[in-house]
């Protein structure tokens, strides 16, 4: 009610001055003097009410008096031209200072808000349409020091936000109207001064023990940082990239200093410490792309991430550790999305900047994993280290795979040997995945790390499945039997699967139900891969090798016979191994394969092959089956009627 009445009184004074001006009742000087006397009278009445403990009445009268004084000075300058701009500016500044002093004296935040708004509006109301940046920035500096001093004394944190909002709006108005490159120094000095002032203000009361950290202690520096970054970008980025990067580094410095000061004086203010560190890391990270090029940004972030992680552990700062992980994630994002494609023309494999950069990011994850693994105090550090190591390892495999694929593609096109390099690509990729799978599996078993074991088995499975499918695309490759890259690459994968089974048997993971079955699964996968590789190799050689088209005729009949012989020999080998190793599953697999061979002879060879090949297939398979049955019966008799 009091504030409404005071507002109505100010409006009444304003309309009275307007009406008197229009009808010429009193001179302009008298009108201004009467308005100022009314304002002073209201200020006096407000002080008198304060002394009689009429708090709300006092605040209303004081606010109304200040409004009357602002209005009178504005009218004297802009309407009646009784005061020049400088004098009016000085008077309005005195009114603002008086209002803030009265607000502090009366502990009245509304009066402080009104005074601050009046001080902020003064340059707008008295603007002469000229570029007076130096005077504006000095005035705002003095105004903000007074306002923030009052806020510090009375713990009015909301006043900080209002002061900065008004300051940055006035700065923006000047920038949009008057800025040009010749005014760069003035613009940067003003921007830096306001930035430093408003990042110090929320923290000083906490350090001095006058207040605890409120949300605006983090929000105000964040807003200040965003505004400073945007204006600095507009001023410096295009023509002065080095200067812009230096500005960001300087912006990070006070936040680091404040974080250290808060940690030393009030270590319980974890949120404020974290906010300051987060802002410092943000500006440090932003400084890198502001200065460096594509690959250098990724390199810098790959180095910065583990460093922040180590500092976070060293000084027990969770925010810094989170920042390190965030920076590593940014580097990973650049590798996966920004750096693609890795190469655009023929290049030197491995020894090139793009590959080295991406491999460095993979190594950075490994270093981060090592840093986390050495912190045994936290229960989650081991799992976190495992995750980082796994990401780094998989990224390394991915980068190597992209390097191999890109080189094979470009080299094949340049040398006009696309098919040769396609084969080279697939064999090399499958070998890489096999070796990587074994490494992951071994490390996972050695360190009881389930995700690493899963990754290892997954890579081995990817290698085997890719080899099984890719060989179908190279059936017409004119290579020799067995001694060629496709077959030897397949054998290498088989050896990798068999080695994985042996490793799993030698280092079984504790308390895992599937541990006993996994070696058998891997061994069975190795045998299946060997069978499929041998089948395709025998068919390819007899159907397509030597320049033959393999479309129909003699080559197809020979190829079908070769497949039948291959399956039969493979079944005999399985049966022998089953007896020698006392493994019933191997014997059962041998019988199943013999049965499959018989079905093939009847359904495929009998209908497609020439007469001589039918005879060979039937006689050969029949003799093998009879011989196997005879040997199996003799062995059963020697074992007392049961298989060992």
Image: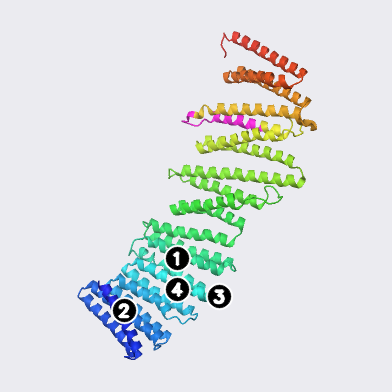
Compute the Cα span from label 1 to label 3. 23 Å
Compute the Cα span from label 2 to label 1. 36 Å
Compute the Cα span from label 3 to label 2. 41 Å
Q: Is residue 143 magenta?
A: no
First to last magenta residue range: 492-513
| 349 sits left or right of 61 in the view | right
Q: Position of residue 462 (x, y in %)?
A: 60, 36
Q: Residue at x 53, y 60 (%)?
A: 286
In which quadrant is the C terminus drawn? Answer: top right
Q: Position of residue 455 (x, y in %)?
A: 55, 38
Residue under pointer 3: 180
Asked which quadrant contains residue 496, the reply is top right
Q: Nearer the viewer, mark 4 or mark 2?
A: 2
Quick one: label 3, few (<14), some, or many (20+) residues within 10 Å?
A: few
Quick one: label 4, few (<14), some, or many (20+) residues within 10 Å?
A: some
Q: Nearer the viewer, mark 1 or mark 3?
A: 3
Q: Main secondary structure of the magenta part?
A: helix
Q: Nearer the viewer, mark 3 or mark 2?
A: 2
Q: Earlier in the sequence, mark 4 or mark 2?
A: 2
Q: Position of residue 304 (x, y in %)?
A: 53, 55
Quick one: label 2, few (<14), some, or many (20+) residues within 10 Å?
A: some
Q: How many marks?
A: 4
Q: Which mark is residue 170?
A: 4
Residue under pointer 1: 224
Q: Secondary structure at mark 3?
A: loop
User: Does residue 419 lie above or below 99 as drawn?
Assistant: above
Quick one: label 1, few (<14), some, or many (20+) residues within 10 Å?
A: many
Q: Earlier in the sequence, mark 1 or mark 3?
A: 3
Residue under pointer 2: 11
Q: Earlier in the sequence, mark 3 or mark 4?
A: 4
């Amino acid at each position: 009610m009091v504030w409404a009445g005071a507002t109505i009184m100010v409006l009444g004074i304003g309309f009275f001055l307007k009406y008197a001006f229009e009808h010429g009742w009193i001179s302009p000087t008298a009108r201004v003097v009467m308005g100022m006397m009314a304002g002073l009278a209201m200020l006096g009445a407000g002080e008198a009410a304060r002394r009689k403990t009429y708090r709300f009445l006092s605040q209303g009268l004081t606010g109304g008096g200040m409004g009357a004084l602002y209005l009178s000075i504005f009218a004297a300058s802009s309407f009646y031209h009784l005061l020049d701009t400088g004098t009016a500016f000085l008077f309005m500044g005195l009114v603002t200072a008086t209002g803030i002093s009265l607000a502090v004296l009366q502990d009245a935040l509304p009066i402080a808000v009104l005074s601050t708004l009046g001080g902020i509006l003064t340059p707008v109301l008295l603007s002469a349409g000229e570029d007076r940046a130096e005077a504006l920035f000095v005035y705002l500096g003095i105004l903000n020091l007074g306002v923030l001093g009052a806020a510090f004394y009375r713990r009015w944190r909301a006043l900080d936000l209002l002061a900065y909002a008004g300051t940055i709006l006035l700065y923006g108005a000047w920038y949009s109207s008057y800025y040009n490159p010749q005014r760069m120094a003035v613009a940067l000095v003003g921007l830096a001064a306001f930035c430093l002032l408003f990042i110090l203000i929320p923290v000083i009361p906490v350090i001095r023990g006058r207040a605890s950290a409120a949300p605006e202690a983090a929000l105000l520096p964040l807003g200040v940082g965003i505004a400073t970054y945007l204006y600095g970008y507009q001023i410096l980025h295009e023509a002065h990239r080095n200067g812009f990067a230096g500005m960001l580094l300087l912006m990070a410095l006070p936040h680091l200093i404040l974080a250290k000061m808060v940690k030393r004086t009030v270590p319980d203010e974890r949120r404020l410490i974290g906010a300051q560190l987060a802002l410092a890391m943000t500006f440090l990270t932003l400084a890198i792309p502001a200065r460096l090029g594509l690959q250098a940004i990724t390199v810098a972030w790959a180095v910065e991430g583990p460093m922040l992680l180590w500092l976070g552990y060293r000084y027990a700062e969770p925010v810094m550790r989170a920042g390190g992980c965030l920076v590593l994630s940014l580097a990973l994002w650049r590798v996966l999305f920004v750096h693609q494609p890795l190469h655009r023309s023929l290049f030197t494999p491995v020894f090139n900047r793009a590959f080295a950069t991406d491999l460095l990011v993979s190594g950075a994850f490994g270093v981060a994993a090592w840093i986390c693994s050495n912190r045994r105090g936290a229960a989650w550090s081991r799992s976190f280290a495992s995750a980082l190591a796994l990401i780094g390892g998989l990224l390394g495999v991915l980068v190597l795979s992209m390097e191999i694929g890109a080189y094979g593609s470009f080299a094949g096109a340049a040398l006009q040997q696309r098919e040769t390099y396609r084969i080279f690509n697939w064999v090399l990729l499958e070998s890489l995945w096999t070796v990587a799978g074994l490494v992951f599996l071994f490390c996972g078993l050695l360190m009881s790390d389930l995700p690493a074991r899963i990754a290892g088995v997954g890579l081995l499975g990817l290698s085997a499945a890719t080899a099984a499918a890719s060989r179908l695309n190279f059936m017409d490759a004119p290579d020799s039997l067995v001694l060629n890259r496709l077959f030897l690459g397949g054998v290498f994968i088989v050896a990798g699967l068999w080695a994985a089974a042996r490793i799993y048997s030698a280092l079984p993971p504790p308390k895992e139900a599937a541990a006993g079955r996994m070696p058998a699964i891997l061994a069975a996968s190795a045998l299946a891969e060997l069978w499929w590789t041998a089948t395709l190799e025998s068919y390819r050689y007899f159907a397509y090798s030597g320049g033959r088209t393999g479309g129909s005729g003699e080559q197809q009949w020979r190829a079908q016979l070769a497949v039948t012989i291959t399956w039969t020999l493979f079944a005999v080998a399985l049966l022998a191994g089953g007896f020698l190793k006392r493994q019933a599953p191997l014997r059962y697999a041998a019988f199943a394969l013999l049965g499959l061979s018989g079905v093939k002879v009847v359904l495929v060879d009998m209908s497609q092959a020439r007469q001589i090949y039918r005879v060979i297939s039937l006689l050969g398979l029949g003799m093998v089956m009879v011989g196997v049955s005879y040997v199996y019966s003799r062995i059963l008799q020697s074992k007392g009627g049961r298989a060992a």
